[in-house]
Amino acid sequence: MKKLLILPLILLLISSCAKDTTPAPEVIEPDVCDSIPKSFATDVQPIFNDNCVVCHNSSNNQANGQSWETHAEIAANIDAILTAINHEAGKTPMPYQLPKLSDSLIQVIECWASDGAPNN
Ligand code: HEC
């Protein structure tokens, strides 16, 4: 007789456990780019000046003949630049034979690019 009472109890326990495994509601994250300063002159160009222009300048033909000194030069080549700095297949990884840029610097360039690479 006792066994008959225990069985419904076990079933109740199992079903309540099953409820606990319901996934938490999905957290909607704000767009990371919203909180990142991404002016070309203030935030983006200094990254190029510090990490690229030593090789990529108008008097240097070593770096594929490509200069990253001006907004126009950078904006016109932004897809190739993003591929190179993310070390993705298809482009030589940049900075050339030097450590990859930090994730936060790459993010500034990516967020500026996703805004349409404005001259701001
Ligand atoms: C130490 C010198 C040096 C530095 C620093 C450097 N580059 Fe380069 N870059 C080169 C050379 C050399 C090439 C040509 C490499 C090749 O053709 O394989 C090149 C080529 C490129 C290319 C074309 C790659 C391709 O495969 O077509 C891009 C885009 C580029 N660099 C972006 C950058 C960016 C952005 C930075 C800074 C974050 C940077 N580079 C820093 C030397 C440099």
Image (cartoon, rainbow, N blue to C red):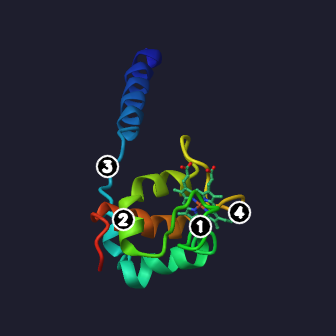
Q: Where's ligand 1: which quadrant?
A: bottom right
Amino acid type of the residue tagged 2 in the rendering: Ala
Q: Earlier in the sequence, mark 2 or mark 3?
A: 3
- Where's residue 8, x and y in %? 37, 22
Q: Secondary structure at mark 2?
A: helix
Q: Is residue 10 above or below residue 94?
A: above
Badge 3 local density, few (<14 within 10 Å), some, or many (20+)? few
Real-space CA distance between mark 1 and mark 2, rounded to the nearest whole angstrom:
21 Å
Real-space CA distance between mark 4 and mark 2, rounded to the nearest whole angstrom:
23 Å
Q: Earlier in the sequence, mark 3 or mark 1?
A: 3
Frontmost residue, 108 versus 92: 92
Of labels 1 and 4, the one closer to you = 4
Q: Is mark 1 within 8 Å of ligand 1?
A: no
Q: Earlier in the sequence, mark 1 or mark 2?
A: 2
Question: Which residue appears at 49% of the width and 51% of the height?
Answer: 83
- Where's residue 24, x and y in %? 35, 47
Contact (Cβ within 8 Å) of mark 3 with mark 1: no
Real-space CA distance between mark 2 and mark 3, rounded to the nearest whole angstrom:
36 Å
- Where's residue 112, x and y in %? 35, 68
Badge 1 local density, few (<14 within 10 Å), some, or many (20+)? few
Residue under numbered circle 1: 102
Residue under numbered circle 2: 75
Q: Is mark 2 within 8 Å of ligand 1?
A: no
Amino acid type of the residue tagged 1 in the rendering: Ser
Contact (Cβ within 8 Å) of mark 4 with mark 2: no
Of labels 2 and 3, the one closer to you = 2
Q: Earlier in the sequence, mark 3 or mark 4?
A: 3
Residue under numbered circle 3: 26
**Residue 116 numbered tag:** none
Residue under numbered circle 4: 98
- Where's residue 46, x and y in %? 50, 81
Of labels 4 and 2, the one closer to you = 2
